[in-house]
C-alpha cells in the first residue's frame, strides 16, 4: 500500500517496481475479500476525465454496482490487480457491474504506455486524478484502494491492498448488491 505525492519519490518507486517485476511472479496470490462498510453512506462525488478524453460522472452510473479503484503505475499491487479488474469487467459488465480505475497523480504520458503492458488490456474507463483532489475526498490512505458503490449510490464495500477481482466469490458478492 503506497501514497506518494512527491514526483521524485514516484520515479524512485517506479524504477524499483520495474527492477522487482521479475520477483512479482513469486509473490503469493492476491486476496479476494471485500470489507463491508457497516454504516453505508453516500459515495463522494467523482467526476473526472478519462483516457478517452471523456468526462465520467459517478452520479450518471446510479442503478449499477460501481467498482472504484484508486491506483498508480508505480504501485506493484496495483499493477498486479489490473488484469483481474478487466476480467471482472468482462464477466460482470453486462450484468450491471462497472469498473472505474482512478489513476492518482500521473498523466496520460505515464499511464498509456503502462496500459500497453497489461494483458488483457483494460476496456473500462481509466480516469485521471492528477491533483489528488478526489483521492482526498474519498479519504484514500494508500494504493491500491477500492470502493464498491451500490446501485443506491451508497458505499457498500472497501478493499485496501491488491485484490483478485475476477475471483468467483468476489464477483458473486458484487452481483448480490444488484438483488438488494
Image (spheres, rainbow, N blue to C red):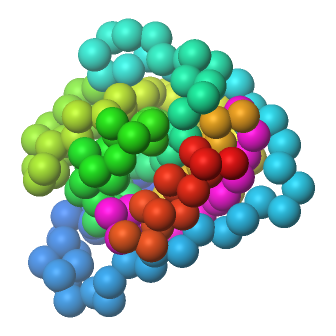
Q: Quadrant of residue 169?
A: bottom left
Q: Quadrant of residue 22?
A: bottom left
Q: Is residue 176 above or below residue 33?
A: above
Q: Is residue 99 visible?
A: no
Q: Position of residue 105 (x, y in %)?
A: 48, 36
Q: Is residue 127 visible?
A: yes
Q: Residue at x 23, y 34 (%)?
A: 123
Q: Quadrant of residue 43?
A: top right
Q: Residue at x 36, y 70 (%)?
A: 167
The extreme right residue here reads: 39
Q: Is residue 69 above or below residue 105?
A: below
Q: Residue at x 30, y 22 (%)?
A: 51
Dominant secondary-structure state across the stretch colored magenta: loop
Q: Position of residue 60 (x, y in %)?
A: 57, 16
The extreme front residue here reads: 179
Span of residues in magenta: 153-167
Residue 162, magenta (yes or no): yes
Q: Position of residue 149 (x, y in %)?
A: 64, 42
| Foreground of the two, 15 or 142 | 142
Q: Is residue 112 above or below residue 148?
A: above
Give the left or right position of residue 125, taking residue 43 as reference: left
Residue 113, magenta (yes or no): no
Amino acid at each position: 500500500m503506497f501514497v506518494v505525492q512527491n514526483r521524485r519519490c514516484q520515479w524512485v518507486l517506479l524504477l524499483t517496481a520495474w527492477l522487482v517485476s521479475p520477483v512479482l511472479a513469486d509473490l503469493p496470490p492476491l486476496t479476494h475479500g471485500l470489507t463491508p462498510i457497516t454504516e453505508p453512506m453516500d459515495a463522494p462525488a467523482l467526476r473526472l476525465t478519462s483516457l478517452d478524453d471523456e468526462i465520467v460522472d459517478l452520479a450518471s452510473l446510479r442503478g449499477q454496482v460501481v467498482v472504484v479503484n484508486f491506483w498508480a503505475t508505480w504501485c506493484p499491487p496495483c499493477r498486479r490487480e489490473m488484469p483481474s479488474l478487466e476480467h471482472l469487467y468482462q464477466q460482470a459488465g453486462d450484468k450491471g457491474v462497472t469498473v472505474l480505475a482512478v489513476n492518482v497523480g500521473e498523466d496520460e504520458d505515464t499511464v498509456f504506455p503502462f496500459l500497453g503492458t497489461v494483458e488483457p488490456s483494460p476496456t473500462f474507463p481509466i480516469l485521471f486524478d492528477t491533483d489528488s483532489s478526489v483521492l482526498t475526498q474519498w479519504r484514500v490512505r494508500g494504493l491500491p484502494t477500492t470502493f464498491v458503490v451500490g446501485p443506491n449510490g451508497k458505499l457498500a464495500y472497501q478493499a485496501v491492498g491488491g485484490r483478485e477481482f475476477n475471483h468467483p466469490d468476489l464477483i458473486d458478492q458484487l452481483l448480490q448488491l444488484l438483488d438488494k
